[in-house]
Image (cartoon, grey):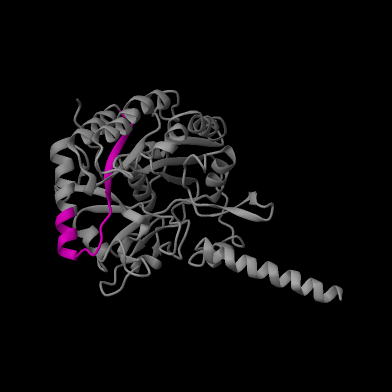
Amino acid sequence: MIAVVAIIILTLFIAAFIFIIKKKKMQSWLWNYTKSQFTSSPEPSGTKHVMFCFVDHYEPQWLNKDNIELERKRVDRWMTDYPLMASKFTDSDGCHPKHSFFYPEEEYRKEHLDKISDLCAKGFGEIEIHLHHENDTSDNLRKTLSGFAQCLHEEHNALSIDPETGKPTYAFIHGNWVLDNSHPEGHWCGVNDELIVLNETGCYADFTFPSPDTSQPAMLNTIYYAKDDPDKPKSYETGKPIEKGGKAWGHLLLIQGILGLNWKVRKKGIFPQIENSDVRHTFPPTPNRVDLWVDQGIHVKGKPEWVFIKIHTHGAQDGDMDTLLGKPVEAMHRHLNEKYNDGENYLLHYVSAREMYNIIKAAEAGEEGNPNAYRDYILPSPSFKRL
């Protein structure tokens, strides 16, 4: 009888576990994550350098397309409150936290970008490209991305100019996380050769992932190159991890944030919380999460002493601004500085998306020393227009 009860309990637990995996859409990455927990990376000697990058799916028209005053209120709060918050903190290089605003092409308003450009000119961030699209074509996408990149450069002095091509170059976040037409039913994209189009229009890296759904690649907690198959969606499912002494491959570099399980926070005291690098009111950036981000140790293969942390948010959503501009984010920065900027065991570096890319490429090239020296390694800083 006891054995029967035990089997029933075990069966119910397994069924519940499978249900949660499917509900949380973990099937694309959980197996690889589990395997990774049984392998260890070499522990670096000496000082660890922590590159901290905060990217934002910044959408002033969120759930609103007809109220320009609400848009202005959202943008103006960032222009006022972000420098007040960020000015309280500096990294080991004397830089304040830098916010990377991935602005949607389909929501372009010159007045908003003028304000954000002014904030960036003061050293508080940079502007990159975000896009939501549906039933698109390769030709139209190419025109859209090239046109928006040129607009951001000409109108706002945003985006870095590629020294080889002389054209604007950009980082990219795909709307709804469905890069390369990866939605199971083909929604919110439509372009199977999207990685090729991004490459051709000047995209230096994709910052879309991790994803909360099945668009998440099987390769997780990895910086890697992906090669496009123009006839198939989700070509980034696998690729080649970037490594010291290596070289570029394929069509696009993917710079991922942390994805995994947080066993220190459990639902109903049993199931671990999913850590997906998202920061919002309902998922604040606690010291526990910061420690998990650092411990994950995302790095260029062969250079584990340079750790890359990329977290993300939707900064224009009203309910999250108190978290992103107030005490919760201040607590995050305070913990980062107190624990990971002691000058001996750790040095903290606040970086933009572009600066993170440059430092990653420096690591790939085998550069040594302080990564602060490589913030402009390949792509120079934009000048930005002041108001």
- In this rendering, the answer to whether 149 lies above or below 28 is above
Residue 305 or residue 356, whichever sits in front: 356
Q: Which residues are magenta?
A: 123-144
Q: Residue furthest front?
A: 66
Q: In the image, residue 78 lies at what x, y percent?
A: 34, 30
**Residue at x-position 33% and y-position 33%:** 74
Q: Check if residue 141 falls in the magenta segment.
A: yes
Query: x, y (%) of residue 166?
Result: 14, 47
Total marks in image? 0
Residue 197 placement, left or right of 342: left
Instruction: Report whether residue 383 is seen.
Output: no
Q: Position of residue 112 (x, y in %)?
A: 23, 34
Quadrant where the N terminus sits is bottom right
Relative height, residue 78 to residue 366 (above, below): above
Question: Can see residue 67?
Answer: yes
Instruction: Check if residue 28 falls in the magenta segment.
Output: no
On the picture, is 221 further left or further right than 61?
Answer: right
Residue 299 point in image, percent of width and height: 46, 51
Image quarter of the C terminus: top left
Residue located farthest toward the right when viewing the structure as drawn: 1
Write the residue at 14% across / 56% down.
Answer: 143
Q: Nearer the viewer, residue 276 or 196?
A: 276
Which residue sits at x=75%, y=69%? 9
